[in-house]
Image (cartoon, rainbow, N blue to C red):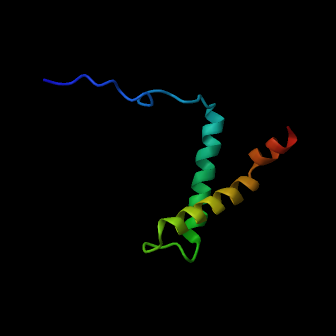
Amino acid sequence: MRIPYETPPALGREFIELEPEVVAVILLTLAAGWQRACAAEDVNANAGEVIMTERLRDGMRIALKNSPWNRDLKAT
């Protein structure tokens, strides 16, 4: 016998609908940030998650500042 549990509300639902262009910018920013994070001297297999996360954040910020999307946001 199985107890019928309701599925969690987040399961299988979309929270927001993003245009494909927005999704592309997010993924490109993440990829560029990860490349910068991997190039950092203090990021390696033994680095803690805080270091990796901070370098990823920093890399994503730099990538976003240099992206055409950032210039579009400033114009609005």
Snapshot quadrant of residue 54: bottom right
Q: How many labels were placed on the picture? A: 0
Position of residue 39 measured from the top left corner of the image (x, y, whole percent): 57, 71
Q: Is residue 4 left or right of residue 67?
A: left
Q: Residue at x 75, y 45 (%)?
A: 69
Q: Residue furthest right?
A: 75
**In the figure, residue 76 lies in which quadrant?**
top right
Rendered position, 24 above or below 42: above
Decide: is 1 above or below 37.
above
Which residue extends farthest bottom? 41
Residue 56 x/y as whole percent? 58, 61
Residue 66, image x and y in percent? 75, 56
The residue at 71%/53% (across/down) is 64
> The N terminus lies in which quarter of the figure?
top left
Q: Position of residue 20 (x, y in %)?
A: 61, 33
Residue name at image x 61 percent, y 57 percent: 32
Nearer to the camera, 14 or 25 = 14
